[in-house]
Amino acid sequence: MKTAIEALRRGIPAQRVLTEPADVMSFSFDASFGTHAPDVVCQPLSTEEVVHIVQVANAYNLPIVPRGRGTCLSGGPLAVHGGIVLDFSLWDTTLVISPDDLTATVSPGVLTKAIDDAAKAHGLMYPPDPSSSHVATIGGNLAENAGGPKGLKYGVTKDYVLGLEIVTADGRVVRTGGQTVKNVTGYDLTKLIVGSEGTLAIITEATLRLIPRPLAQKTALVVFDTIVDSGRAISSVLTSGVLPSKMEIMDRACIRAVEAYEPLGLPVDAAAILLVELDGHPLALEDEMKIVKGACESVGARSITIAQTEEEAAELWYARKLVSPAIVRIKPTKISEDATVPRSQIPAMFEALERIRHTYDIELVIFGHAGDGNLHPNILADARDPEEMKRVERAVEAIFDEALRLRGTLSGEHGIGTMKAPFLANELGEDGVWLMKRMKEAWDPNGLLNPGKLFAPPGTKLVLRDE
Amino acid sequence: MSKAYDATFDCIQCGYCLPSCPTYATFQKETHSPRGRIQLVKLVHEGRLTYENIRESMELCLGCRACETACPTGVQYGVILTETIDALTTRRRAARTERVARQMVFRKLLPSAHLGRVRPVMERAIAARLPERAHDFRLLDPLPDGAKALATVLPKPFDTLRARDVSRQDGRPAYRVAFFKGCVMDVLFHHVNERAVALLEAGGCDVVMTDEATCCGALQRHAGDASEAKRLAKRNIAAFEALDVDFIVQAIGGCGASLVEYDTLFEPGSAWHERAVRFTKRVRDVSEVVSLLSIEWTRPINRRVTYQPSCHLTNVQRVTREPRALIEQLPGVTFVPMDGADHCCGSAGIYNVTQYDASMRILDDKMPNVLATSPDLVVTTNPGCHLQLALGAKRTGASYDVVHLVELLAYAAGLTDD
């Protein structure tokens, strides 16, 4: 290891090659579970430095684990087999908006929100908006194909990537895609790399697509007496001719947790509330909101409150913002799931989650992006209680089973990583996994790129405890 | 069970604290982030790291507590930091001279009633430009670099206040308040205390002071001397209990933060805890109380003004609205908000003495944002920030003046001429 570190330092300044115990331990975690210290952390600032690191990794057979700011909820940047963590957080040097091309060219360490902020100055927008966008890097968002509330109308990260510069497992620098919206030249490697969780190649630059920024937003809060009504309202709105930019749901447990944390006057007897945001031209929004109101009322919504000013809208969204601080008052350890189902199955998924809550005797609240079926059942537990954590592990497995039974998916936007790897074949089937493994072997024959992610050794179980 | 270890379990490692942390921004690695530090403390308690492993990371923390304001799950970072610094201090084999010096300063000098007598001597020394001249004669050489640098930006002595019209106190006072003077503050920034009291009186408050009060204990606590901090807290609690007042008012962000957290020094359920809670409920920053008063701002400022909030006022006392609202309502003020105002300037108690190089790197990262406002005046609410920003002007050749908020208010109210 000592000679490998010396070799790394021949291509990268020593102060960006970290080996002190406190340093490697500070890069041993993300926002999911487990502590896995790398042998060394490198903080590259150029493609050449990444190539150098890859060459050293090959020479010494060391795993390479790319990491942005470690906000991942599925274990993507965990060095489960040690090796080199590539910390991209310092490499935020390129952020070029080309307003005439409607593109942004970015280095991997640029914060996602910074891209949208820069686009805003030109009347443009970078829509993907994971809730961590003010902390997370675009590199991490690309690796995990991050989503967010606006996914309903605008899609997710992969829908905004025109081209990438990547470093392959053997140290070649390759450009995929290009600068144009239309591009059918060869296999679409760009879309393959986006969401591959650092297992196929290392992303060193991206060209992103921007779109015109909507002129205004309008928000409504809709209250429901039953979950079934809220599910019908989602379908009713989405077939009304209006496509909201966000449709966020909070269940009763969530509403009550927020009210207990900070009384805002939310209806604690309601089964669910839906926050609907429209965006577009201000005049159009007035009419469109009437249509949404009618669509909700036609399926029995108890009430609908439409924000008349930006301040009122911010107040409505404030309730959603308080969900995180409110629910961790229930219990401190938060297990955030993102099993996603077809929209028609949202009420069925709510029922299944209610059963799981009782069967495993766990604290479970549901919120999330109802409009695209991407629910976030969150389990609240205490990591210091091993018996409870075992029940949580079984409950999480049950959530996955139910999502798949309802023709859904294990993960809408958080990624597979280590957390969901044991369940991959349940969704893809053995042949599906085999085909993906063939891809992996073609791109990374020596298995150096982020090993231990996506594919779990047979018999691996979900473990949320430090063992 | 360690309170710090327990508190680490509230961290969900989301990383939302990262953008708020000045040391993460300046030193550019997770090791110097709140989330990193919380994880490191947890690993020490689990036997996977030693205290020595994490010493640098923890000692370079400014203790600004901006991470607590950013945290979506309410992690008590202050508890984690304080307990860990205590443990590190216990384990450190400090040089004998340093131990004696700390003992002298923290246990004897700061809490001493004699500290006040130093003031006239200091003021004369500063008026005679002794600190600068001492530099020439290398008299300051034995001092650490930080102390040497700060000696060059100490405030000039001010004239005492003009005679005040006390007739407004006739009849019922707006509030009866006790004023907390602090220790170092009352020596180096005596004029700020004087002006704070004058403002409160001009607004119709009945202001009382007590000689029983002593140093707030903040520096002792941050340096890992919890027992001394507790002793001082008890003395202050007892001193102010004896006064029947609506508020206990102070004009120092750092001391105020120490005072409002007195309850955390004692076991919940104990008699002292209960007394501490009663005490903390009455603690107010001077800007909070002045906002409640009606004072006429008669004299226009006619300057470009920006505001550097004290971290402990923002993140511990959670006072953010009042100081800025007061500045903006003064006649003739062109207020220019500073980008990244919530980032600590690197003063952080005695950090700019004990960690001088780190402190200057943090200051140098802050200065472009200060200069971008092209200020004539930078307003602060804490003596540490005041000196640090004066040092920032010196390092960059900028010509702005630094004033405490109450100096600006007192001038606008016509209570002073400078």
Image (cartoon, coloured by chain):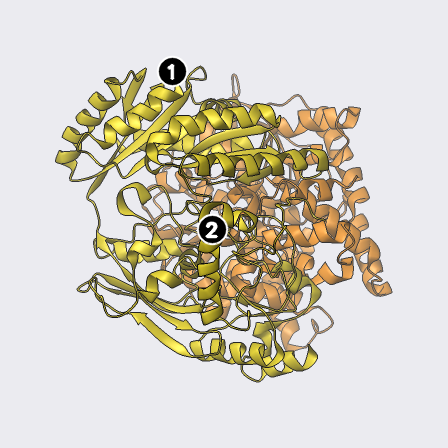
- Tell which chain the image draws in orange: B
Q: Amino acid at mark 2?
A: Gly
Q: Secondary structure at mark 1?
A: loop
- Tell which chain the image draws in yellow: A
Residue A303 location (% of width, % of height): 30, 17
Q: Amino acid at mark 1?
A: Asp
Residue A308 visible, this orientation: no
Q: Disc 1 marks which residue?
A: A225
Q: Quadrant of the N terminus of chain B?
A: top right
Real-space Cα separation, disc 2 to disc 1, in angstroms: 33 Å
What residue is at 78 percent from the left and 55 percent from the top? B88
Of residues A214 and B264, the one drawn nearer to the viewer in this rendering: A214
Look at the picture and state if A444 lies above or below A191: below
> Left or right: where does residue B100 sit relative to residue B219?
right
What residue is at 53 percent from the left and 22 percent from the top? A260
Q: Disc 2 marks which residue?
A: A415
Residue B371 visible, this orientation: yes
Q: Chain of mark 2?
A: A
> Left or right: where does residue A279 sit relative to residue B301?
left
Q: Secondary structure at mark 2?
A: loop
